Amino acid sequence: MLIGKTEIPPRGWNSFDCYMGGITEEQALANLEIFLKKLKPHGYEYFCLDAGWYADGDQKLHEQRIAADQFRTLNLDEFGRYIPSPVNFPHGLRTLADRCHENGIKFGLHMMRGLPLGAVERNTPVKGTPYHARDIYDPDGACSWCKYWVAAKADHPGTLAFYKSEVEYLTEELEVDFIKLDDVVEHPDHVTLFGEAVASVPRPVLLSLSPGGECCRENWDTLGKYGNMVRITSDAWDHDETNLQKLQSWYEFQDLSSDSLRADLDMLPLGALQVTTDFRQSRLTPRGKRVMMTIMALSSSPLIFGGDLPRTPQEDFDFATHPAVLECNAWCIPGRRVSFQHHIDIRKSPDRRDSSHGWIGIFSTSELPRHIVLSPCHLGFSELPPLRELWSGYEVAPTANGNAEFYLPPYDVAFLRY
């Protein structure tokens, strides 16, 4: 069943930033326990495993095999659908889904456009049809970065049937509530097919469309008929400079995001990252984290935590659960730029509960510290209302002539409530 709208942007956790293509049952359960303690009380409700839940072994093994032009063991059923790795998930994924549901959490999995390469190699039947995998295989539409999924012909009836069989398996056997559908944003024909598959099952499914490097405005209406959130950025890793990319992507789609299709600025690269290959704590500086969370709040982007939760410091949980960030993210109308001059980018997000209130972000895009004097019109007002800076808690006192004055370090932000 398609979910038409979400009252607030989805909040959750995804395994990609920390485990990439190789998480195990033990690791997933450990993350779920911390999720329940640290994130669920703040409205985080989706627990999603990213790519590779059907593959034996971890990301390090994956990279070793790829370097040798091989694949890990990828597990398929008789209809060419990926199924959970019995090595990584000896009790199956339904056990993990049940644990989520027992605690009021929704369970999610990553999928890709097309069909598994192994299905084509074995020419498995498409469930309930006279077709086989090679009938729907498209040799010309392959994903450039994932070789063990291949393309399917959007105009072949067997492709819709295959997608329906996948969604049926995910929702009935594994009780999935969230599907992250990858390599699909620039393929609205496949979004339509997969969306029709989701519409055909009784279980409500939140559909996340990804990745976003090729997202374009012209496809928005089609994406919005079936998806709930759509990536509008490439992968966002833990570098402060990524915030400038987020600002630009947000601006390009600022008038399109709504409660029926959320513009998604990618995951929060906080906490312990790439733990099986290049273990590190997030390289974002405290300033970078502050700027990122302000962007995510004012844009009303989904909030998907990316770090390994058992090894994440409390500081990063505090950023992801900051009360002002969560209130703004949940209740603002997605923000728009009201002024951009002298390397100062100002975004304004009215409160949809009361439009006389709202939030403002004053972002410095300069590598130099800035002393800024802003008139009310720079902030979208005829006269300056009371303002409070939310990261520091101080009240902004107007100058004698009714302006607002700020000192911003390089690439920093003032996050205001009006």
Image: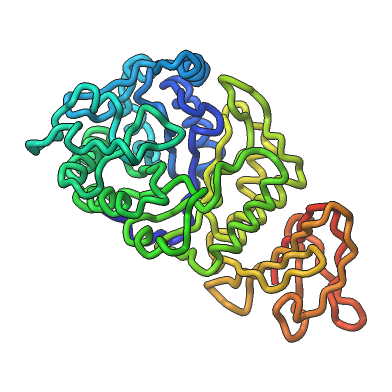
Q: Is residue 257 left or right of residue 192?
A: right
| Residue 281 lies in quadrant | top right
Percent coordinates x, y for residue 357 in the rendering: 63, 75
Where residue 49 appears, x then y in whole percent?
A: 42, 33
Task: Identify the residue shown where x is 68% and y is 50%.
Answer: 243
Residue drawn at 36 percent across, 31 percent down: 99
Examine the rendering and report whether any part of residue 334 can be seen: yes
Residue farthest toward the right in the current orientation of the protein: 400
As displayed, is residue 10 above or below residue 343? above
Q: Can you tell which quarter of the image residue 117 is in?
A: top left
Q: Is residue 25 left or right of residue 387?
A: left
Q: Position of residue 296 (x, y in %)?
A: 60, 54
Front position in the image: 252 or 336: 252
- Counting the numbered discs, the total is 0
Q: Nearer the viewer, residue 66 or 246?
A: 66
Instruction: Kindly give the residue lying farthest to the front in the view shown.
Output: 140
Is residue 60 shown above or below 303?
above
Can residue 42 be seen here? Answer: no
Relative to 381, residue 306 above or below: above
Q: Residue at x 25, y 48 (%)?
A: 154
The image quadrant that residue 38 belongs to is top right
Q: Is residue 400 rendered to the left or right of residue 287?
A: right
Q: Residue lying at the far left in this picture: please name it.
A: 130
In this figure, which colouring scheme has been used for the structure?
A: rainbow
Foreground pick, 36 / 341 = 341
Front residue (pair 149, 142): 142
Identify the image quadrant of the C terminus. Answer: bottom right
Q: Position of residue 192 (x, y in %)?
A: 28, 54
